[in-house]
């Protein structure tokens, strides 16, 4: 029997570990660019500690407002390398995790948390390497009453997250890659990396004025009829 709002799913179609590793350490801005700049989370979701790098398949939690019962349940289910992604209703009045949950997740090998809501005990995150991204910080804690769901589609940071989507984060924020898009995104990512190498070479050789970016800007200025005053 289906029970909306109270579903727990143990089955996730995760990317292969080798595929996850190919994206580790990649610039989130570059990944976002090759996906039409449509799949980065909004700037509400930001790194909360000294660790500003995260990469792994999404293990999703849909939580009731000010409640972390399903978040706790998820920590007993998630596998090493998973990123626990929590829709906490964007609430910034109650935190849904703190140092006990960070310690537990680290012990289990969980890759980090992404929380559309608030957290607490940020001293721990400034002193340790466990990556947590969230929308806010507050000392006020949560309740444990439910309802909620685990490993169903959720919203987080303005993006739809499917269980098993690849989550990649750095100091700029978080980007989401659908499992079926991973191969094509990686090929495009290799191309944009090479393009950045070429652009850096132009800068170092004082040849920037000859690059395609400058030419495109000049063409647009001419097309739009700007008044040029010299």
Image: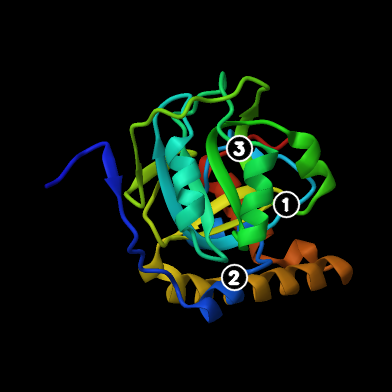
Q: Residue at point 54% right, 39% down?
A: 115
Q: Which residue is mark 2?
A: 23
From mark 2 to mark 3, how far is it between C-alphas?
21 Å
Q: CA distance from mark 1 to mark 3?
A: 12 Å
Is residue 102 or residue 219 the one in the foreground?
102
Residue underneath mark 1 = 52
**Label whose residue precedes the other's in the sequence (1 or 3):** 1
Q: Earlier in the sequence, mark 1 or mark 2?
A: 2
Q: Looking at the image, which is closer to me, 144 or 62?
A: 144
In the picture of the structure, the residue carrying the numbered disc 3 is 134
Q: Is residue 144 left or right of residue 123?
A: left
Q: Please tell me in which quadrant of the rendered image residue 193 appears.
A: bottom right
Q: What residue lies at 33% left-to-right and 48% top-to-bottom?
A: 153
Question: Which one is nearer the viewer's eye here, 21 or 42?
Answer: 21
Element on which disc 2 rests: helix
Q: Give the mark nearer the N terminus: 2 vs 3.
A: 2
Q: Is residue 113 visible?
A: yes
- Of badges 2 and 3, nearer the viewer stands 3
């Amino acid at each position: 029997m289906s029970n909306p709002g109270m579903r727990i799913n143990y089955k996730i179609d995760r990317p292969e570990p080798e595929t996850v590793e190919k994206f580790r350490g990649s610039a989130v801005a570059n990944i976002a660019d090759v996906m039409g700049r449509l799949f980065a989370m909004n700037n509400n979701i930001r790194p909360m500690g000294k660790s500003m790098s995260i990469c792994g398949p999404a293990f999703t939690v849909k939580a009731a407002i000010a409640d972390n019962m399903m978040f706790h349940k998820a920590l007993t289910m998630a596998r090493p390398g998973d990123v626990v992604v929590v829709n906490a209703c964007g609430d910034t009045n109650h935190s849904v995790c703190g140092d006990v949950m960070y310690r537990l997740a680290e012990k289990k090998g969980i890759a980090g948390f992404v929380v559309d809501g608030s957290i607490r005990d940020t001293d721990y995150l400034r002193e340790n390497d466990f990556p947590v991204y969230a929308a806010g910080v507050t000392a006020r804690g949560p309740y444990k009453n439910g309802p909620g769901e685990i490993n169903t589609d959720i919203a987080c940071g303005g993006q739809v997250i499917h269980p098993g989507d690849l989550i990649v984060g750095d100091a700029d924020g978080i980007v989401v890659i659908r499992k079926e898009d991973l191969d094509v995104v990686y090929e495009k990512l290799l191309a944009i990396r090479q393009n950045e190498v070429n652009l850096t070479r132009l800068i170092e050789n004082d040849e920037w004025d000859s690059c395609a970016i400058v030419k495109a800007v000049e063409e647009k200025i001419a097309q739009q009829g700007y008044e040029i005053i010299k």
